[in-house]
Image: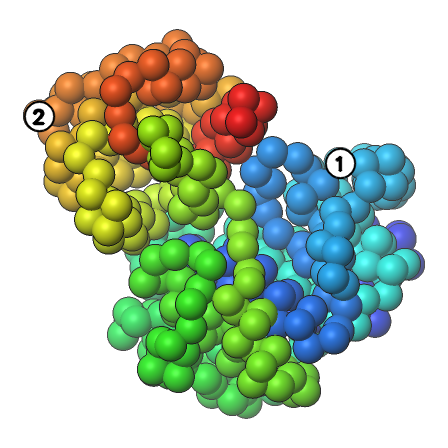
Amino acid sequence: MKALLEALGNPEKDLKVLHIAGTNGKGSTAVMTASILEEAGYTAGLYISPHLEDECERVQIWDGTHHLIDQVEFDALKAKAKEASPDATVFEIYTAAAYMYFAEKRPDYVVLETGLGGRLDSTNTIEKPLVSVITQVGLDHTAELGSTIFKIAREKAGIIKEGVPVVSQTEDMNVGNILRRTAEEKGCRFIDASSMLDKYRGLDLAMKGAHQLRNAATAAEAVMAAGIEVSDEAIENGLENAVLPGRFEILGGGDGEPYFIVDGSHNPDAIEALIDTFGAFSHTNKIKRTMVIFGCMKDKNSTRMVQYLTGGLRGCTFAAAAVGYGRAESPERIAGLFSASGRGCYICDDVEDAYRTAMNGNYQCILVTGSIYLAGEMRTLYLQEH
């Protein structure tokens, strides 16, 4: 990646970056951070992954318009990166293209989300960010990052740079100790956002769920730790207005129509948070009949996710859907996991089959989860009809 950037003239070298890593919550935190900066009157570049429906979602400018990179321009920048390094990975190409785009558009700040891990991630080519942010750390991508929480935490800590302030929200004591120790070794100020939640409890966040309060606190503390001048009003408005599609996103419902919710939870920790959020939502809206459409990738801990869903969501009907993606787990195997947990499960040939099965049923709510790819495909189908 460094060789690729050097061949491109190091477009990243003058960017003012807020760098965000973590297992869960980094996308939401990134969007909240960009939203605060925008409310404060700054222009923010935003780089996130994966995309939900359109690859251009990965590269955005927040200046009151929230516009995505133009597809033609994105294709040209990707081609330029590919020409400079024919063997580069897809994510390396995306990252290099984003750097070139931001170098050209010159936003005041860039909010940069890692793709995988931290230490060896393509985004870790930023040598001196304004702040290093690490959200929730859990067991995910274990084949690449390590099979224990300690190994994964060390990979995430790899984004910490000499003298750059570190903001973390982890409540795991072991993870916290690793991050604190790394920060101390590198002479960094360490800010624990999880101890500051009371400052933000009064906010009416558009993004629902108790976990979003942690993300909100992390985003606000990150902007301040970066030394960026923002008012309390900008922080409040930025956090309350921030929305990231596909994160417990309620697309429609009410007036006789079932609620339709898409959620990209793709590992056991995220599913646990989803169960809490949905529990509160269903209680408030007196929902008794829900269909849960679940699909995931083969490299995820699908067994644990299904166990959490069957144990935490009572009175639900389940359906397994095959996502249109190469790493997708088969619906037959997913249905077998539900059966092993003592629950029945519809087997759907594809996403559209699952969508029709749900919409033709007598349900008050349809909840789609297990994969950001599944959430994206379902979101597209629903919005085409509504």
Q: Identify which residue is drawn at 46% across, 22% down.
A: 323
Residue that label 1 marks: 87
Residue that label 2 marks: 342
Amino acid residing under circle 2: Gly
Give residue 260's position: percent from left, percent from top: 39, 34
Q: Identify which residue is drawn at 42% across, 73% down.
A: 203
Please tell me which residue lies in front, 263 or 307: 263
Total residue callouts = 2
Amino acid residing under circle 1: Asp
Please tell me which residue lies in front, 208 or 374: 208
Q: Is residue 143 left or right of residue 149?
A: right
* Chain-order first, disc 2 or disc 1: 1
The residue furthest front is: 255
Vertical relation: 36 (above or below) 233? above
Give residue 114's position: percent from left, percent from top: 58, 56
* Label pair 2/1, CB-CB below 8 angstroms: no
Q: Is residue 22 left or right of residue 5?
A: left
